[in-house]
Amino acid sequence: MEPQTTLTAARLIVEQLKAEGVDHVFGIPGGPIMPLYAALEEAGGIRLILTKHEEGAAFMADGYARASGRVGVCCVTTGPGATNALTGLAVSQSDHVPVLLLSAQVPTHRFGKGAFQEASPETVD
């Protein structure tokens, strides 16, 4: 009998990425996004390409999408991790290149209270 595993949001995201045919994720692990990286590693089948900076992850996902014709996926931590990816995402948007950004967020009970690396995506246009 196999031990039961808890179905987490991170595992659900990985299952959906696999169902959509995603086979590469570009990013830099850290802080609140670590459960997603752990779920990606545990599940296997999706190659993690680690970058030195979030902007690089966004541009690598863009390049992958352009070269492969498939969605490019980048995965970053909350706050500055997400804002660092914006330039690459803006290029993808302006050129109509399919790129998905997965970003973490601070715990809900800490939101709006100046939590470490807190940033509101609603205020970034």
Image (tube, rainbow, N blue to C red):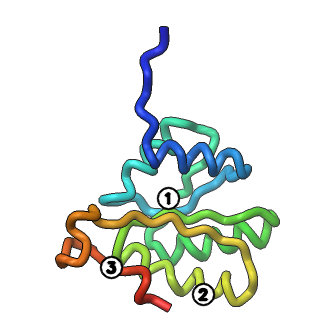
Among numbered discs 3 and 1, the one appearing first in the sequence: 1
Task: Please tell me whether residue 123 is drawn above or below residue 52 in the rendered image.
Answer: below
Amino acid carrying mark 1 in the image: Leu
x, y percent for residue 99 = 65, 71
Q: Nearer the viewer, mark 3 or mark 1?
A: 3
The residue under the point 71% across, 72% down is: 98
Residue in the picture at 44% in, 88% down: 124
Outermost residue, top side: 1
Q: Report the residue at 48% width, 14% height from top.
A: 2
What is the CA distance from the residue labelled 2 to the residue labelled 3?
A: 18 Å
Q: Which residue lies at the image location 50% right of the left edge and 59% below the top edge?
A: 50
SS for dot 2: helix
Image: 64 above or below 18: below
The picture quadrant where one finds residue 29 is bottom left
Q: Image height check: is 9 above or below 50?
A: above
Q: Which residue is mark 2?
A: 90
Q: Tell me if mark 3 has few (under 14), some (14-19) or many (20+) residues whose alpha carbon lies within 10 angstroms of its own.
A: many
User: Which residue position holds label 1?
Assistant: 50
List x then y, in percent, for residue 49: 55, 56
Q: Quadrant of residue 122?
A: bottom left
Contact check, label 3 and label 1, Cβ < 8 Å = no
Task: Tell me, yes or no, whether the two marked residues, 2 and 3, touch with CB atoms within 8 Å.
Answer: no
Helix, strand or loop at mark 3 = loop
Residue under label 3: 119
